[in-house]
Image: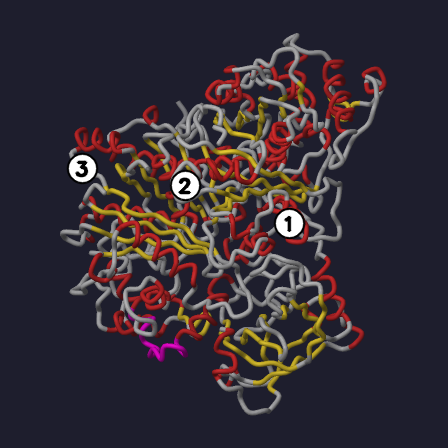
C-alpha cells in the first residue's frame, strides 16, 4: 500500500472565452451619439418617458423606444457612493465617487464618475455636467464621458429628483 | 384546490470562505444527505430534484446540474435548475413546493449552493461589458447609492447599519453552520473597518462563502409518515409567492420596491397574516448589506414607511429581548453562499417552526416569514411556514 | 362547451394556445436580445388577441454562458414590461423546462394563463468551447471536448452496434432539410438525395456536414392557458395530455450511448403509446440522435417525424426544445394533426429529455 498522501484539493482550469457583442439597434444610436460627444435619449411611445441609454424597449410597456431625443450635457446627482474597493479591471484610482446622474430632460438616471470636487463634498442634488474626452479619443462607448463635474449652479431641490432614486 | 406541502427535512453545510475539502458534488451532497437523514428518507424515496444557484460564472461550470445529477440521486428522475438571481434559493424552494401542491409529486428534494471560491465572484459580477465604463465594484457598489437614498428619505441616523451588522454577527455565534463567527464584534469594530462603498463599511457587507442548503418537501401523507418515523414535526407552508419587476424604469422606487410589497401582501393573504409584527414569531430576511434590514422592515410591512430604522434602533429585531427577531441564524451578513442564501432563509424559518434551530431557536415559534430578493431589488420570493396544518 | 381530452397527470387541462418564433439565422447582428424578443411577444400575444396583462405567470429559459455575462435573463424581461410586478420565474435550461414549470403552476387555482419563452444567441462566442463548460468540471471540461467529437462517438457506437448506417444518418438529414423547405423560419433547408449527401466530407468521422446542426440565433414564445380560457382564446387548443422529463447519468462513459432510456421513460409516463401518433417533433441536434429518440419513443411507421425540419434546420440553443413543442402544437391547432409528440433535450449526448403529448380532441 502506498503511504497516505495529501488529497488533491485544487485543480486550475483557466477559462478564456471571447464574445462578439451586438449592441442592438437602440443602443447603437446612443453609442453613435457618444462618439460625437452628445447624449441621445429615446422616448417611449406609450408612457412618453425618456430613456438614456435605451436598451431598445420601455421596461414598463415592453415596446420599442423609437423616437430619438437629443439631451443636454447637464444633470443632477440623485444619489452616489464612494468606492474604496479594488477589483480586477478597475481603471480608476480609489477612492472615487460613483453617482446616479439624472440628465436634464431624461426620466432615468445612469451611473457616472464624479470628479473635480473633493469626495467629501459630493452630495445628493449636486448639479453636474459631462466632461468629454478629447475629440480624437471619442468613441462609441461610455468611456467617451471622462467624468462629470460640478456646474456651480445651486443644488437641485430634493423634490425635483426624489422620485428618481 | 392545491395540496398541502410541508418541510419534512432540512440540511446545510458548514459555510466557509473556502471549502476545498469537498468538490461541488461533495458540497451539495453534504447538505442533501443531512436533509434526507433529517426526514428519515433515502435517495430512493425522492420523486424529483429541484436545484438552484446564482450565475454559472461563479464556479465556471455551465448548467452544473447536468454533472451533479448522479451526485443528487437524480438519475431516472426529473431534475430542474432554477436561476432567478439572488432570490434563487427562495424561488428554487417554491418551484419544488409547487411540484407537491400541484399533486404531481409526494417528496421533492430541493438544493441550492454556491462554491464562490472556485471562481472570482466579484469578477463574475463585474465582467467587463463593451460600451460601458467599468465603474461598478461588485454588488456593494450597486446597492450603496440606494442605501444613501434610504437614509435621506427616512432620516435614519448613520449608526443603524452598524447596529444590524453587530446584531446579526452576535446571533451567528449561536449557529454552528454560520461562516462568520466574530465573538468580539462591536459598533467600534464595524466603524473601524474599511469604508468599502461609502456609506457601507466592510463589516456591514456579507462575506463570500462556499455552502449549500437542502430541504425535503413532502405532501400531507409524506409529512405524516416522516413525523412517525423521525418524531420531528413538519413545518407547514401557509403561503408562498414570487414577484418580479424591471431593473430600472422612470420613476422606479428602488428603496421600497412595489414587487416586494405585493409579494408580501400575497403571502400574508394566503397565510391569514394581517399584522406581520404581531403574527410572526421571527423572520429570516435577505439582508446582504446591513441597511437592508430597516429597508425590508418597511417593505414587508412590519412598520410604516420611514420607521424601519426605529425598530432596529430599539432592538426589536434582536433575539436578545426584541419582539420580532430577524435573522437569528446570523443571516446573509454571516453566511453568503449566494445561490443558497435565499434557501437558507426559507430553511431557517422552517427550522424555527419545527423547533429544531438549537441555540438560535426562538422559543414557541408558531409562524415565521422567509424572504429572498435578487437582481436590482427586483426579484422577490417569500414563504410563510407554521406549526399548524393549514 | 367542448371538453378537453383526458390527460395523464395534472388535475387541470392545460393547452398551448399560441406559438411564435424569431427568424432563425446564423447571426442576428443588429438586434440585441430585447429587440429580438419584442416582436416575438407581440406575435405570440397578438395571435390570440391578448396583451401581457392577460397572463398570470411568466417563465423563461436561457443561459448566461451564451451571452457571456451574468443575469442575462434579467434584461430580457424589459422586452415584456413586467410592470405592475408579475409572477415570474426562470430556469437555466432549455425553455421547454420553463414550459414544464408553467404547466405545474397552472395546475393550481389562481393562475389561468402563462407566457413561456426562451432565447439563445449562439453566434456571440465560440460555441464549441462554451458548450464544453457543461461537462464535469474536474475530469472532462479541462479537456475542452468539442461537442461534434462527442456526438461522433455516439454515432460511432450506433454504427458499431449495427443499429444504423451512415446512409441512415444521411436519410434523416435529407428528410429534415427537405421538410424545412416548407418552414419559413428555418435556417437550413434543401432538397438533396442521400447519395448526394454521402459525397460530403467528414467533419468528424463518422459525421459528415449534413449530420450536424447549424449554429443559430433564435427565440421563441408560447402562451399556455388552462380550462375554459384555452377554448376562449383558441379555436382548437393543443392540450397537453401528458408531460414528463427524466435525466441520465452525466458521464458518456457511464451510458449506453445508442439508447435513450430517459426519453423512453418520459415517453411512457407522458403516455406516448396511449394512442396513434400523427406527428413527432424530436429535438435531435445531430442526425443520428433522431434515430435513437424515435426508437426510444417506439414511434412506428406512419409518424411524420420533424415536419418542421427539426434541430437540423435550426438549432437555437435554449429555445430549440420549446420550438419543438410549438411546432407540434401548431399542427394540432391548425388541424393538420390530432395527436402529436414533442421532445426536448438538454446536456451532452441526450443526457436529459422531456416528452410532451399534445392532443386536439375530437
**Label pair 2/3, CB-CB below 8 angstroms:** no
Is the image coloured rainbow, by chain, by secondary structure, or in one colour?
A: secondary structure
Q: Chain of mark 3?
A: B
Rendering coords of residue A62 (x, y %): 60, 57
User: In percent of the image, x 21 and y 41: which residue is there?
Assistant: B389
Left or right position of B78 against C180: left
Q: Nearer the viewer, mark 1 or mark 2?
A: 1
**Where C278 sits versus B218, above or below?**
above
Left or right position of A95 against C10: right
Magenta span includes B158: yes
User: In percent of the image, x 33 and y 38: which residue is there?
Assistant: B2
Residue most extreme to the top: C162
Badge number at residue B232: 3
> Which range of residues does the magenta coloring cover?
B151-163
Rendering coords of residue B51 (x, y %): 43, 39
Q: Chain of mark 2?
A: B
**Label pair 1/2, CB-CB below 8 angstroms:** no
Please state, as top left, top right, bottom left or bottom right, where the N terminus of chain A lies in the image: top left
Magenta span includes B183: no
Give the labeled residue for mark 1. Answer: C42
Left or right position of A85 against B133: left
Q: Are marks 1 and 3 on the same chain?
A: no
Q: Secondary structure at mark 1?
A: helix
Numbered marks: total: 3
**Where C28 sits versus A108, above or below?**
above
Badge number at residue B95: 2
For the residue pair C154 and C55, the one nearer the viewer reads as C55
Q: Chain of mark 1?
A: C
What secondary structure characterizes most of the magenta part? helix
User: In percent of the image, x 64 and y 59: which residue is there?
Assistant: A57
For the residue pair B110 and B196, the one nearer the viewer reads as B110
Q: Nearer the viewer, mark 2 or mark 3?
A: 2
Amino acid at each position: 500500500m502506498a503511504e497516505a498522501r495529501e488529497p488533491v484539493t485544487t485543480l486550475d482550469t483557466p477559462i478564456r472565452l471571447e464574445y462578439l457583442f451586438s449592441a442592438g439597434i437602440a443602443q447603437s444610436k446612443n453609442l453613435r451619439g457618444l462618439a460625437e460627444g452628445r447624449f441621445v435619449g429615446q422616448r417611449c411611445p406609450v408612457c412618453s418617458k425618456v430613456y438614456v441609454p435605451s436598451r431598445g424597449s420601455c421596461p414598463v410597456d415592453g415596446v420599442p423606444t423609437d423616437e430619438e431625443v437629443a439631451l443636454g450635457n447637464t444633470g443632477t446627482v440623485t444619489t452616489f457612493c464612494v468606492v474604496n474597493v479594488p477589483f480586477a479591471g478597475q481603471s480608476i484610482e480609489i477612492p472615487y465617487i460613483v453617482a446616479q446622474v439624472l440628465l436634464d430632460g431624461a426620466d432615468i438616471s445612469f451611473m457616472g464618475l464624479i470628479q473635480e470636487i473633493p469626495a467629501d463634498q459630493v452630495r445628493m442634488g449636486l448639479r453636474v455636467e459631462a466632461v468629454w474626452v478629447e475629440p480624437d479619443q471619442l468613441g462609441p462607448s461610455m468611456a467617451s464621458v471622462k467624468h462629470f463635474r460640478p456646474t456651480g449652479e445651486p443644488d437641485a431641490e430634493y423634490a425635483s429628483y426624489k422620485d428618481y432614486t | 384546490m392545491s395540496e398541502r406541502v410541508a418541510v419534512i427535512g432540512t440540511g446545510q453545510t458548514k459555510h466557509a470562505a473556502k471549502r476545498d475539502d469537498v468538490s461541488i458534488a461533495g458540497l451539495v451532497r453534504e447538505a442533501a444527505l443531512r436533509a434526507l437523514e433529517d426526514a428519515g428518507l433515502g435517495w430512493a424515496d425522492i420523486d424529483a430534484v429541484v436545484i438552484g444557484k446564482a450565475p454559472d460564472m461563479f464556479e465556471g461550470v455551465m448548467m452544473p446540474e447536468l454533472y451533479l445529477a448522479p451526485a443528487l440521486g437524480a438519475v431516472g428522475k426529473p431534475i430542474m435548475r432554477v436561476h432567478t438571481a439572488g432570490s434563487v434559493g427562495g424561488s428554487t424552494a417554491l418551484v419544488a413546493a409547487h411540484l407537491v401542491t400541484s399533486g404531481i409529486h409526494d417528496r421533492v428534494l430541493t438544493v441550492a449552493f454556491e462554491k464562490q471560491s472556485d471562481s472570482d465572484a466579484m469578477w463574475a459580477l463585474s465582467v467587463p461589458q463593451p460600451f460601458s465604463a467599468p465603474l461598478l465594484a461588485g454588488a456593494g457598489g450597486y446597492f450603496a447609492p440606494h442605501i444613501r437614498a434610504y437614509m435621506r428619505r427616512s432620516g435614519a441616523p448613520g449608526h443603524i447599519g452598524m447596529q444590524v451588522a453587530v446584531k446579526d454577527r452576535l446571533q451567528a455565534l449561536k449557529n454552528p453552520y454560520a461562516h462568520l463567527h466574530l465573538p468580539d464584534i462591536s459598533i467600534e469594530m464595524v466603524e473601524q473597518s474599511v469604508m468599502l462603498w461609502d456609506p457601507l463599511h466592510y463589516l456591514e457587507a456579507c462575506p463570500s462563502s462556499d455552502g449549500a442548503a437542502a430541504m425535503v418537501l413532502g405532501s400531507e401523507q409524506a409529512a405524516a409518515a416522516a413525523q412517525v418515523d423521525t418524531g420531528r414535526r413538519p413545518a407547514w407552508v401557509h403561503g408562498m409567492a414570487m414577484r418580479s419587476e424591471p431593473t430600472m424604469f422612470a420613476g422606479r422606487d428602488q428603496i421600497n420596491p412595489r414587487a416586494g410589497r405585493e409579494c408580501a401582501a400575497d403571502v400574508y393573504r394566503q397565510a391569514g397574516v394581517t399584522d406581520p409584527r404581531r403574527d410572526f414569531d421571527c423572520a429570516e430576511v435577505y439582508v446582504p448589506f446591513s441597511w437592508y434590514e430597516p429597508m425590508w422592515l418597511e417593505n414587508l410591512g412590519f412598520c410604516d414607511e420611514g420607521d424601519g430604522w426605529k425598530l432596529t434602533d430599539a432592538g426589536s429585531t434582536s433575539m436578545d429581548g426584541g419582539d420580532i427577531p430577524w435573522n437569528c441564524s446570523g443571516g446573509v451578513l454571516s453566511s453568503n453562499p449566494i445561490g443558497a442564501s435565499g434557501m437558507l432563509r426559507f430553511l431557517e424559518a422552517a427550522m424555527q417552526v419545527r423547533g429544531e434551530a438549537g441555540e438560535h431557536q426562538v422559543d414557541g415559534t408558531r409562524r415565521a416569514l422567509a424572504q429572498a430578493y435578487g437582481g436590482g431589488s427586483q426579484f422577490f420570493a417569500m414563504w410563510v411556514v407554521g406549526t399548524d396544518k393549514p | 362547451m367542448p371538453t378537453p381530452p383526458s390527460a395523464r397527470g395534472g388535475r387541470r387541462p392545460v393547452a398551448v394556445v399560441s406559438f411564435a418564433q424569431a427568424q432563425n439565422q446564423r447571426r442576428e447582428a443588429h438586434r440585441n436580445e430585447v429587440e429580438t424578443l419584442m416582436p416575438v411577444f407581440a406575435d405570440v400575444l397578438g395571435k390570440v388577441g391578448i396583451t401581457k396583462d392577460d397572463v398570470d405567470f411568466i417563465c423563461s429559459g436561457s443561459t448566461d454562458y451564451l451571452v457571456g455575462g451574468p443575469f442575462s435573463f434579467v434584461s430580457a424581461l424589459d422586452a415584456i414590461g413586467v410592470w405592475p410586478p408579475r409572477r415570474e420565474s426562470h430556469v437555466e435550461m432549455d425553455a421547454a423546462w420553463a414550459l414544464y414549470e408553467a404547466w405545474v403552476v397552472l395546475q393550481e387555482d389562481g393562475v389561468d394563463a402563462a407566457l413561456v419563452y426562451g432565447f439563445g444567441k449562439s453566434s456571440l462566442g465560440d460555441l464549441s468551447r462554451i458548450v464544453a463548460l457543461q461537462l464535469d468540471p474536474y475530469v472532462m471540461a479541462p479537456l475542452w471536448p468539442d461537442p461534434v467529437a462527442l456526438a461522433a462517438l455516439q454515432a460511432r457506437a450506433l454504427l458499431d452496434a449495427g443499429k444504423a448506417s451512415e446512409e441512415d444518418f444521411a436519410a434523416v438529414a435529407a428528410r429534415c432539410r427537405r421538410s424545412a423547405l416548407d418552414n419559413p423560419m428555418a435556417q437550413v433547408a434543401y432538397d438533396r438525395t442521400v447519395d448526394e449527401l454521402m459525397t460530403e466530407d467528414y467533419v468528424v468521422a463518422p459525421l459528415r456536414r449534413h449530420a450536424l446542426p447549424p449554429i443559430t440565433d433564435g427565440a421563441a414564445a408560447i402562451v399556455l392557458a388552462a380550462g375554459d380560457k384555452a377554448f376562449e382564446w383558441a379555436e382548437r387548443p393543443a392540450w397537453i395530455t401528458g408531460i414528463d422529463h427524466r435525466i441520465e447519468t452525466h458521464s458518456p462513459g457511464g451510458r449506453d450511448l445508442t439508447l435513450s432510456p430517459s426519453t423512453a421513460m418520459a415517453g411512457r409516463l407522458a403516455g406516448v403509446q396511449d394512442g396513434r401518433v400523427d406527428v413527432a417533433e424530436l429535438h435531435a441536434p445531430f442526425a443520428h440522435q433522431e434515430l435513437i429518440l424515435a426508437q426510444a419513443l417506439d414511434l412506428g411507421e406512419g409518424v411524420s417525424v420533424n415536419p418542421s425540419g427539426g434541430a437540423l434546420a435550426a438549432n437555437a440553443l435554449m429555445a430549440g426544445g420549446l420550438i419543438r413543442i410549438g411546432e407540434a402544437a401548431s399542427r394540432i391547432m391548425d388541424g393538420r394533426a390530432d395527436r402529436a409528440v414533442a421532445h426536448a433535450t438538454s446536456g451532452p449526448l441526450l443526457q436529459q429529455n422531456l416528452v410532451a403529448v399534445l392532443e386536439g380532441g375530437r
